[in-house]
Image (cartoon, rainbow, N blue to C red):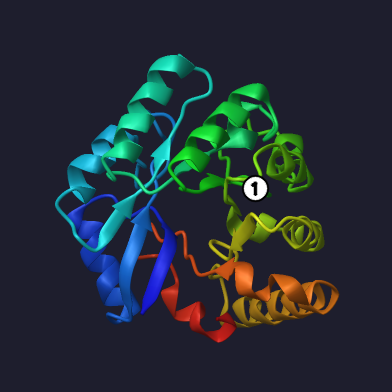
């Protein structure tokens, strides 16, 4: 069974596109919301409440939660604990570079403890930030900061999304140093303007991964499959070569 742990499938239309693009090879997926219901991404990423309206009726799709660090934390923690207790979400994702906070901030530790209580993962967008408005700050999204949180929340499993691109070696080091840290490969493989450019990207990515696994072979069993799929233009056909 193949499970895609990182998608932005948020409605039936996109789910059908995903199934078509994947050829039915992926049986279950995790859908990820945004912290802000006013997302400007195309297709727009819903917040957790809107996403649950879709995923609650889809047995093959599981939802994450997401907390807006600029809004009232107490009410969001209470709501997310309710969703975790009811098994309506399978973890929580945070967006450090977009909201200007470090993964080891006190607020994040509280969220991490909540995830640990229900044995659910805390996921982070780490590395490069897709940001058409040029507002993201990269220093908050560096994988090295996950090392602090992993030691402050040893009972919580933590996932570094996107293999921390482009900080592959730093990500590998953090994962190797903490048994409770995992990584996914989502959104690293994209389709460039020409087949030749895409081929070069594939080759470079393979070389980079080989280098990471040479230095940190222990992490191979903590790498998870994810695409960041969000519609018909996501190049699922380029995923298979590097699984």
Viewer-nearest residue: 6 or 88 = 88
Name the image quarter holding residue 204: bottom right
Viewer-nearest residue: 177 or 215 = 177
Name the image quarter holding residue 24: bottom left
Residue drawn at (60%, 69%) of the image: 223
Q: Please say if 197 is above or below 159.
A: below
Task: Give the tally of numbered discs.
Answer: 1
Residue 87 shows in this picture? yes
Q: Residue furthest bottom?
A: 241
Q: Residue furthest right?
A: 215
Q: Quadrant of the C terminus?
A: bottom right
Question: Crowding at label 1, few (<14), some or many (≥20) Cα neighbours within 10 Å?
Answer: many
Name the image quarter holding residue 79: top left
Residue 208 shows in this picture? no
Viewer-nearest residue: 172 or 112 = 112
Q: Is 76 on the left-hand or right-hand side of 149?
A: left
Question: Residue 126, how many percent across, how many down?
Answer: 65, 47
Residue drawn at (69%, 74%) of the image: 205
Question: Residue 168, how many percent across, how many down?
Answer: 75, 62
Q: Is 170 on the left-hand or right-hand side of 103?
A: right
Question: Residue 1, how many percent across, how many down?
Answer: 36, 80
Q: Please say if 223 is above or below 161.
A: below
Question: Residue 65, how many percent across, how many down?
Answer: 39, 39
Residue drawn at (44%, 16%) of the image: 74
In the picture of the structure, the residue carrying the numbered disc 1 is 126
């Amino acid at each position: 069974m193949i499970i895609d742990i990182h998608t932005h499938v948020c409605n039936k239309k996109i789910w059908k596109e995903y199934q078509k693009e994947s050829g039915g090879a992926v049986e279950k997926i995790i859908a990820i919301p945004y912290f802000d219901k006013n997302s400007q991404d195309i297709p727009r990423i819903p917040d957790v409440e809107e996403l649950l309206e879709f995923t609650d009726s889809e047995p093959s799709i599981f939802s994450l939660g997401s907390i807006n660090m600029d809004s009232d934390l107490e009410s969001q923690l209470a709501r997310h604990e309710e969703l975790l207790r009811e098994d309506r979400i399978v973890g929580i994702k945070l967006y450090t570079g977009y909201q200007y906070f470090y993964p080891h901030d006190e607020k994040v530790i509280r969220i991490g403890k909540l995830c640990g209580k229900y044995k659910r993962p805390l996921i982070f967008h780490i590395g490069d930030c897709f940001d058409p408005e040029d507002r993201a700050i990269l220093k908050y999204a560096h994988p090295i900061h996950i090392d602090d949180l992993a030691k402050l929340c040893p009972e919580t499993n933590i996932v570094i999304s996107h293999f921390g691109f482009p900080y592959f070696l730093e990500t590998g080091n953090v994962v190797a140093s903490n048994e409770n840290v995992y990584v996914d490969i989502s959104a690293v493989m994209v389709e460039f303007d020409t087949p030749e450019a895409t081929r070069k990207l594939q080759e470079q990515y393979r070389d980079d991964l080989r280098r990471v696994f040479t230095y940190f072979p222990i992490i191979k069993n903590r790498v998870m499959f994810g695409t960041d799929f969000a519609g018909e233009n996501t190049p699922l056909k380029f995923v298979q070569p590097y699984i």
